Image: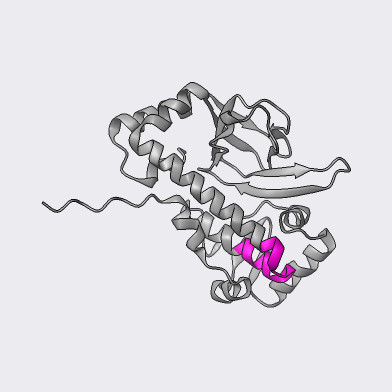
Amino acid sequence: MLPRLLSFGNLPPYERQLLEQALRRKVRTIGPHKDIIRERDKPRVANFMLDGWAMRYKQLSDGRRQILSFFLPGDICDANVFLLDEMDHSIGAITHVTYAEVSHADFEALAQAPEIGACLAFRNLVTMAIQREWTTNIGQRSAYERLAHLFCETFHRMRAIGQIRDDGFSFPLTQTDLADATGMTSVHGNRTLQRLRCEGLLELKSRRIVVRDLERLTQVAQFTPNYLHAYGAVKQAAPEIS
């Protein structure tokens, strides 16, 4: 599975080949609960998610953890990572993850290709937009709204990569993961999740979420998907009129 860069626009054949070669050069697989890269490590490569779920997180010295974002298939983990002397956060696998390591030289070549470069820049803007929404979520929404918002966002992101089946999707997160992503204790997170289930908004069974009432869930979360920008779809320039 190639990252969704291939679907952002109509890449010319040369750029498509360039991207495919860069992504196939070094592919790795890592098991659940293992780190792809840790805080303070020196970044050597940019990681492109091919399959599985991963997370960006910070961990305090006493073990408390804040999940800052989730990576799904097609996402890029820190496109600007080569600007750093050392990582200021960690990236860990939630499930089995397959990812492509792209070297600095290969990444520079991709960034200099006109269409791919535009796609990379746009993806970076979408990543920042999602991060702003997460900050708003934790800072201003109630626990009930926060969790509903996370489910809405994940539903839209999974739909963008074609992984929704019968209004549901694979959902490998634990209650601890949910709590760490939304700034709650596990107990509070579990209670809030049960409320969403009891109200018929969603169903969680065997690591799968089924959204029973997306309209009501959207209203509860005060969710608007505009910040996802169709989850990174680059707008095509209007044709010139001669």
Q: Position of 215 compared to 8: left or right?
A: right
Magenta: main secondary structure equals helix
Q: Is residue 76 above or below residue 107?
A: below
Q: Position of residue 213 (x, y in %)?
A: 57, 74
Task: Find out whether residue 135 is within the magenta segment.
Answer: no
Above/below status of 116 relative to 226: above
- Asked whether 191 or 197 is in front, the reply is 191
Q: Is residue 190 visible?
A: yes
State the colouring used for the structure image. one colour
Q: Where is residue 76 in the image (x, y as percent from the top left)?
A: 53, 39
Query: Closest to the observer: 54 or 118?
Result: 118
Query: For the point 64% across and 69% down, which residue is it?
Result: 202
Q: Is residue 215 left or right of residue 148?
A: left
Rendering quarter of residue 140: bottom right
Q: In this view, does 63 lie to the left or right of 113?
A: right
Horizontally, is 71 left or right of 23 in the view? right
Residue 215 in the image: state x and y as whole percent.
54, 75
Instruction: Please tell me which residue is depicted at 72% across the width and 35% down the height of the picture.
Output: 34
| Span of residues in magenta | 137-151
Along the line of sight, which residue is nearer the eye, 53 or 204?
53
Q: Residue at x 78, y 54 (%)?
A: 176
Q: Which is more toward the observer, 236 or 19?
A: 236
Is residue 4 among what the camera can see? no
What residue appears at the point 46 percent right and 24 percent down from the top-left corner? 106
Q: Quadrant of residue 40?
A: top right
Q: Where is residue 184 in the image (x, y as percent from the top left)?
A: 79, 60
Q: Does the magenta stretch include residue 139?
A: yes
